[in-house]
Amino acid sequence: MAKDKKSRTPLPEPLLIDERELGMDASSIVADIRRHFNHTLGCDKHSISAHHLYEALVIALRDRLMERWKSTHYSYQDEECKRTQYLSLEFLMGRSLGNTLLNLGIREEVEKAVSTLGLELEKMMEVERDAGLGNGGLGRLAACFLDSCATLQLPVMGHCIRYEYGIFRQEIDAQGEQVEKPDHWLACGNPWELERTEFIQRIRFRGRVERIGDGDKGFQMRWVDTDDVLAVPYDIPIPGYLNGTVNTLRVWKAVAVEEFDLTQFNAGSYVEAVAGRMHAENISKVLYPNDASESGKELRLRQQYFLTSAALQDVMRRWLRDQGEDFSPFAEKNCFQLNDTHPAVAVAELMRLLMDRQGMGWDQAWAITIRCMAYTNHTLLPEALERWPVRTFRELLPRILDIIFEINARFLSQVASRWPGDTERQSRMSIIEEGMDPQVRMAHLAIVGSFSVNGVAALHTKLLKEGLFKDFYDLWPEKFNNKTNGVTPRRFLALANPGLSELLTETLGVGWEVDLTKLKDLRPKTKDKTFVRKWQEVKRRNKVHLAKMMASCCGVKFNPDAMFDVQVKRIHEYKRQLLNVLHVIHLYDRIKRGDTNDWTPRCVFIGGKAAPGYWLAKRIIKFINNVAKVINEDPAVGDRLKVAFIPNYRVSAMEIIAPGTDLSSQISTAGKEASGTGNMKFMMNGAVTIGTLDGANVEILEEVGKENFFLFGLTEAEVATKRKPYDPERIIHEDEDLSRVIQLIDSAHFNQFEPGAFDALIGSMRSPGDPWMTLADFRSFIDAQQRAAEAFRDQDRWTKMSIINAACCARFSSDRTIADYNRDIWKLKPVVPKLSDQTA
Ligand code: 26Q
């Protein structure tokens, strides 16, 4: 037992219940849904809101999670195990109902219960809003990681901001342009969360730093006259797959401190005092909708510090309660995984808490900090590395800036002694970028303050070591490691694709959901005619489902026997949705000129959100919509080609899209996409990839082999050398197909009454300075698409490729990824929760 453990006052016995009383059978569930509908929610015969029925069901399920949640929590406490906190400004959770039913193994009973009540489970699941607390890949990765940590029974807690507005809802207006609508996802409440006012933390901002005392450890610093904000935690349960573990995602809401600002209040400025509350509460108002850093917005830095400080203080509170004042074993018991640099201020905040709160000296505090922090990088684009003006830091977080300066001074003297006289290297590596407006380089702070730095795919990590972070790799090669991303097969296969899941269980037996290596046994099945036919039937049903969704959102009919060619991801120049459109226009041109022998009918779907301030990305969306309209309305095209933009792409949409996809487009400029994770979701569902040698595509290709992947494009090394000189005009001139495509766009074929609408897009591709080298990959892409079209015409050959893709996906399960994080970085022991009887 720990020393100095503070004892807690026992609760009166009669209050506690043995929650094992709650049955998992349909009739107990029916009783609880009725009770919650009538009593908890106070509904009656006039309440016909689908939301209330959904809510009653969720509360009935939450009750059933509660017992497991508590015993997981008690087991972690009893074992005094090491824990990891996953700090992320984003967790893109999507919907929880289906996932909870799956992970608790009570889908069938709940289906029965719900139909007894004359309701339909599918419809109730549709009521749930996506929890859109993230932009894209990075946020969804965090969500997949939580699922895997709970499934592997690892003591990991997620921390995020409880944004009142998640990622915006995307509408497409009559002109084909993106319109952003606020996502007020909490409007009807969130029945999954539990408010935990007993764990509120106080977060400081602004004020000034005072020097106090001259103790034997030197003087101490005090941060005074601060503007404080309260951080109120809400806990969301994260159930593991059929294993009794329930972990926690803790989301923090900003609330003004109770008292009004007294000076203003007394001066009679009541309204100003209330407005002050609003300013504080803005911190958790809205998720920033850009997925590449756009520095300089003070509110974003306030969000970052708010989350980080709340999470760290929360851990400190628990430490003091359970272990007392002795922090010497702190680093053996705690790890903080930083999801990109967004929470990197944690390095300085932990130093502050250890020194200013616990009275530790610098060296002791640093020794602890550097043993706790681990940093994951998610980008190779130098322009996306986060930087904050020193002046913003000085205003907002003066004590934190002092600490960063001190970290930097000590770090630079280390660099100077390793490379004496190399001042250039010192300024390259410095945490502070000097200049007219000095900046804090958050990646440098994260690297200097962490014991582990990882990339998210093999190629990405290699490029980090050789390029972006080479200086740091030279200094600390042992810190760098790769952790190739993964996705959870529970949500993206078992839940999203019930047809395929049933076939997998029938063929492989149970257990593949937690061990995707079992899918290897599908390989020999490519020769089994009955199996191949079943596989085709499942895919076709999923395509019908996807076609239905598409018809309802864009009014176009799609033929489920055509090849479904899909690209869904954030809209970005480097992801090259434009290259995709060039191919579409090329197919259209072929149809128009009658080059349609041995044609493979195709439906091209493109979806994704553009950052509201990224003008060119929004233009790309309009371009796709304009091209789609011309092609879909041209009677000469008919069923040979259909094109559609998928509006409001989000997690719940992917659950329908991936199962119904034949061809997965992963076509970024080599060396630009850190990993990609959509590529993995498609592969698991038996889609074949057309892709460049970028991010995790490289590893997908390694697993499936060249025969089962449509590879094209320049390699990263070729991109680097071909760049100078790069002559797109010559490429156009020398490629007749490309000339015709460019000619069509130039002639305003897709913008007849909107002169010049796409000049900027064409201009960017024709520029010798085009960093994404779109035209350089045109020919190779068209050829690869032609190979894909030919392969698709031989349905047996295609099905074999599809099966092999699914068979080879084990490496891309987030269970594998998390097992690797745990083996190399966290070193946590799995904990099997003991079912505790509270009343015993
Ligand atoms: C930073 C500062 C201010 C405002 C916003 C941001 C910000 C927010 C989100 C910067 C970046 C992001 C998101 C990045 C992201 O999603 N990266 C993707 O991460 C995936 C998971 O590792 C990879 O698979 C993708 O390759 C990578 O693009």
Image: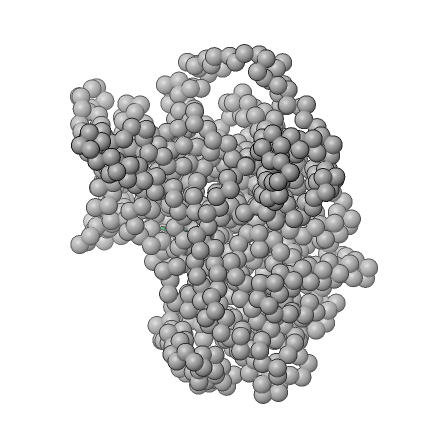
Residue 703 visible to the viewer: no
For the C terminus, give its image quadrant.
top right
Instruction: Report the number of numbered marks.
Output: 0
- Residue 666 position in % (x across, y down): 53, 63
What is the basis of the colouring in this image? one colour
Q: In the image, what residue occupies the spot 48% across and 43% down?
A: 187
Tell me: 99 left or right of 256.
Answer: right
User: Closest to the observer: 17 or 207?
Assistant: 17
Residue extending farthest right: 530
Compared to residue 572, the image places residue 450 above or below, namely above
- Residue 164 position in % (x across, y down): 43, 43
Residue 529 visible to the viewer: yes
Compared to residue 50, the image places residue 175 above or below, namely below
Tell me: 22 left or right of 740.
Answer: right
- Residue 645 position in % (x across, y down): 53, 66
Q: In the image, what residue occupies the spot 57% across and 55% down?
A: 653
Compared to residue 480, the image places residue 400 above or below, namely above
Q: In the image, what residue occupies the spot 57% across and 33% down?
A: 41
Compared to residue 298, the image places residue 7 above or below, namely above
User: Closest to the observer: 547 or 784?
Assistant: 547
Residue extending farthest front: 46
Q: In the image, what residue occupies the spot 54% across and 36% down?
A: 192
Residue 761 lies in quadrant: bottom left
Tell me: 641 left or right of 381.
Answer: right
Residue 573 lies in quadrant: bottom left
- Residue 614 position in % (x across, y down): 37, 62
